[in-house]
Image (spheres, helix red, strand yellow):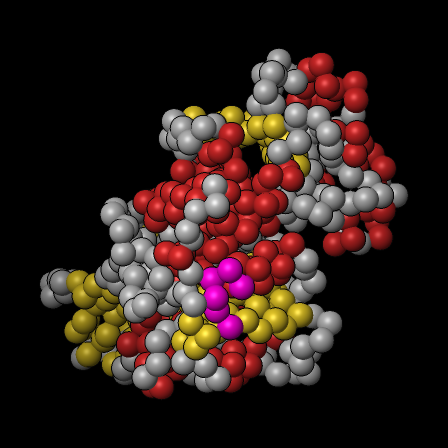
Amino acid sequence: MKRSGPFKGRTISVVNDLSLDEQRYLYRKSRELKSLAMAGGDCGAFKINDRDYQVYLIFMEDSTRTRESFRNAAKFLGARTNVFDAASSSFNKNESITDAIKMLYGYSADSCFVMRTKLEGTCRWLEQALARYAELSGKPRPGFINGGDGKHEHPTQELLDEFSFLEHTQWKEDHIHLALTGDLYHGRTIHSKADGLRIFKNVEVDLIAPELLSMPPYYVEKMKNNGFSVRQFQSLDEYLASGKVAPIWYFTRLQLERMGESVLERAPSLRRSVTFRKDMLGLLPEGTRFYHPLPRDRMHPTIPSFLDDLPLNGWDAQSANGYWTRIVEIGMVSGLLGQDFEGAFAMEPEIVEDFILEAAVLEHRKPEYKVGIKPVEEGIVIDHIASGQTVEDIWSNIEAVRKILKLNVRSSQGVYHSFKGPEVYKGIISLPDITSFGEKDLKKLAAIAPGCTLNLIRGSKVAKKFRLSMPPRIYGFDEISCKNENCISNPRHNEGVPTEFLRKSGSTFVCRYCEKEHTFREIWDI
């Protein structure tokens, strides 16, 4: 059977790698497969049955449920499967992940990789690196599926969670009211819900965690931007006393080992604030279900074992749903499934790089730019640096421009009144010994000092003027790096991943790989 579905070679690094229509398709096919298999029907249409198709399970971080559900999914599909885990693989021998995956890719005619790693953004980078490699080799692009990367995202868990929620709502997508509790700070399954819950039209989310374990502001903001109604509480007691309680609860275990010795003395109170107790049972709405990505902490479970045999238990069926959804995920990226897909595909956002504009030069005005007391006759003047900011910030910006662009030449600089008003200041750097400015440096200047202008001076007059605004992305510079130490692009990992930031809003940028937020000043290594 030829596998040429529209999802062939796709990557699922984050939930949003699938459009809402594509997610609905995944849930529909998973529901179809589960119903067919449970009824003892013929599931042949869901099987690859091709030993030349290789599924690599690369688990550089310990896992049981995710690894085994994918292994069994690949077995059901009839694909050849190789498992690499943290205990027995050679990935700890200073071999780069990129080289290792290229090597494995070369061993099979067609393949996909399920990755779990502490390095955030790994699948996004490998998608980019292997696309070029596949083009050179003439082989099909491999698919990549993120089985969890650090505390970034766990999209395949999110997809099985949403499938379980849809089962609970009897496949109605109009509304969901969900309580998220436990370790919301480290819980990547929680973070994925900021986008995964968009499958529902009206979303109410209650976040329940003490301050030390609360949801990072980035994800709270993302939820609100997605139109979710968000409430926050410090403990289950506070939440249950609020008078409005969700019928669907999602618990996570506390990952206090990630928070250092100083937190250990507070561990009992932190656990107590998010652990369900018997005396809370009467405060729940009728038909409430509890969910958990598993495993529970057997010593300190947030869902105690006395709940196991009660109708509240939704986590056992939820866990089993991972088998069905992961069969479909591999089926999609292998090209087996998708021929019957109808709807909108996920699209990369268009990046319009119009942040450098050549402006008209007004010939009747003479430049007032000086080196000391002598006007610039031939050279470059950078004007309006950090205009409108404090004098201290303007000087800091001037220093950054000089340091990053290596402007160690005869020059003058200063902070001056702007024409915009007596209390408005701007920075100016005059460079009489520099007569040209390359395009890369112009882009770099825009990223360091957005809002400034660059003036090319010839014969004491402005020959050309460029107005620079905030760029939509910043990349290709040696002087930038993601400050998330767990990001695959962070220099400490020596993976050779080129740093790239995408503008989110205003002066905020996110790393292309791990999605950590940075201000435009934070990205520079100064």
Quadrant of the rendering where the N terminus is positioned: bottom left
Q: Tell me: residue 402, above or below residue 307.
A: below
Q: Is residue 227 magenta?
A: no
Q: Please state the extent of the stretch shown in magenta in the rendering.
A: 75-80
Q: Nearer the viewer, residue 490 or 370?
A: 490
Q: Give the percent coordinates (x, y) of residue 408.
A: 46, 81
**Residue 468 image point, x, y percent:** 29, 62
Q: Is residue 469 left or right of residue 321?
A: left
- Residue 235, position as x, y percentages in the image: 71, 28
Residue at image x 17%, y 73%?
463
- The answer to whether one can see residue 423 in this image is no
Q: Is residue 439 visible?
A: yes
Q: Name the residue located 46 percent from the left edge and 75 percent from the top edge.
A: 51
For the C terminus, give its image quadrant: bottom right
Q: Nearer the viewer, residue 144 or 430?
A: 144
Residue in the image at 11% along x and 66% along y: 363
